[in-house]
Image: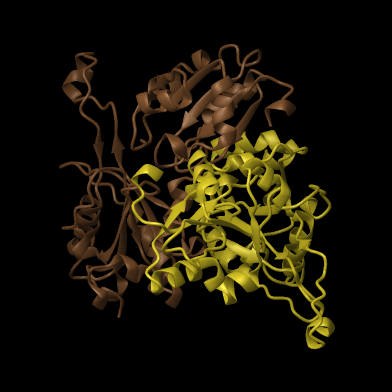
Chain colours: A yellow, B brown
Amino acid sequence: MLSQTRYRMLYLIGLGLGDAEDVTCKGLKIIKNAKRVYLEAYTSILTVGKEALEEFYGRSVILADRDMVEQHSDVILEDAEKEDIAFLVVGDPFGATTHSDLVLRAAERNIKYRVVHNASIMNAVGCCGLQLYNFGETVSIVFWTETWRPNSFYDKISQNRKHKLHTLCLLDIKVKEQTIENMMRGRPIYEPPRFMTVSQAASQLLEIVEDQKDSDKESLAYTAETICVGLARVGTDSQVIKVATLKQMTSLDLGRPLHSFIITGHLHPLEVDMLRQFTDDQSILA
Amino acid sequence: MLSQTRYRMLYLIGLGLGDAEDVTCKGLKIIKNAKRVYLEAYTSILTVGKEALEEFYGRSVILADRDMVEQHSDVILEDAEKEDIAFLVVGDPFGATTHSDLVLRAAERNIKYRVVHNASIMNAVGCCGLQLYNFGETVSIVFWTETWRPNSFYDKISQNRKHKLHTLCLLDIKVKEQTIENMMRGRPIYEPPRFMTVSQAASQLLEIVEDQKDSDKESLAYTAETICVGLARVGTDSQVIKVATLKQMTSLDLGRPLHSFIITGHLHPLEVDMLRQFTDDQSILA
């Protein structure tokens, strides 16, 4: 591929989901030859850190936080018309989080770009045995606070279930967040990263239908008994997939991040056979 | 990863979408060390053939046609409890086509399996700038014949559009098909492979709404003016993306396979900005 490259440009390179070796051979070749290599480190994480990537690539990597990518992209794009710049993204560059902004800013400056695709959670969830073409709209579930309990995903899950479709729920990630006090005082002190777990997501989802328990059960998007799939560290050696009811899911511990969650719709017999590999309670799939 | 492998097993390895170098470093290491390497060659294709893969891997690859995978999977699984067997799939092993059958047959024989994920068309379509979480159910469009014109995808597109969602249309692939005469006479003579183009898909889609032209326009799932995206050879050097109306799309030639098609739903301003890169007629995005 590189031999055919006539222009210097920006490369958006997907790293896949697991560790350093999940980069593609094409991606690795570009990384090794790029002038600068940035790692987008605020919307997802690998199971390994920057140091493991640097060791595998044999070169240094610059961490790009949200501020750099969204406010100071000129730094990233500098010299990209004369040199190859690599911008690394966990998963796929246009997967769960898109980097359209960076691409558009490159286009404004007449900098060419190319994408090296990789697996993202949006397609790798197929590993649980649910067919990707039976999924409806994907939703995001964010951490609730005492005063902020957004639940716009509920109506989308309801639509998907009405059409017998599965729903992939992307779970909240809080990286480099500040307390309100630190933010107001302008102190660059950040909270430890937080990753929503499958049991936290299940608890929030269950609360919504429990709040409506006087409603007709048929009118609910899902119930405590709806079959769900919890996934942790998809694509890694320590991957865990668990099939359980929503209620059961609230007390399961799937270990370290990242977690993802699926609320199933109609289950095809072949999907049921696949899900059986991952449940401790075969009766729920009877 | 291999150093941690205690069991011999079946590896399902995604090859991504472009050429030999789109395999991941992890996948390549497994391929080089596997006892046998099969290439699933009937649901999708790379831009390069088996020989290019063999040269890049430095080893021989066995073509697995539908008959072998679906009827004679024992051949593939032979000795997989004692040796590593690699089963290569264009895209992701659980992408547009799942290989649940093979996995379940392995499980029946107590053969462990592991998946090495990669990009599939299901997530790589994000490269056109439409956000993956704004897509509804994916549909498949098959070649019509004089007597067989299935259009079950129409209602799904209609549902997606009603909820402002985009629809990814996977286009038909006919590999190793027989004429009825050759099939009846038991002659192992196969037709040349056929791949549905973006313009063929657009023509079939347009015919459906033209057949209903007496209907209220508001009740149609889409019209001749609906913005569509045609994609060819996604993830390769020769990738082409074209944004046009459905009507315009019927006369566009995007070149060699594989092609994919998107019927847009509601367009977010950032999506419009991205799509502008790919249209010859900016007025349709006004």
Residue A108 image point, x, y percent:
40, 74
Is residue A195 shown above or below B275? above
B31 or A237, which lies in front?
Answer: B31
- Identify the residue shown where x is 44% and y is 66%: B165
A66 or B15, which lies in front?
Answer: A66
Q: Which residue, as the protein is rendered here, is positioned at the far bottom?
A: A184
Relative to A247, B82 lies left or right: left
- Identify the residue shown where x is 40% and y is 45%: A2
A44 or A226, which lies in front?
Answer: A44
- Identify the residue shown where x is 65% and y is 52%: A60
Residue A216 image point, x, y percent:
67, 68
The answer to whether one can see residue A128 in this image is no
Q: Quadrant of the C terminus of chain B?
A: bottom left
Relative to A88, B248 lies left or right: left
The answer to whether one can see residue A227 in this image is yes
Quadrant of the image occupied by residue B261? bottom left
Count of marks overlaid on the render = 0
Residue A245 image point, x, y percent:
73, 50
Residue B4 image point, x, y percent:
74, 28
A4 or B70, which lies in front?
Answer: A4
Relative to A31, B5 lies left or right: right
Is residue A212 shown above or below B228? below
Quadrant of the image occupied by residue B128? bottom left
Q: Quadrant of the N terminus of chain B?
A: top right
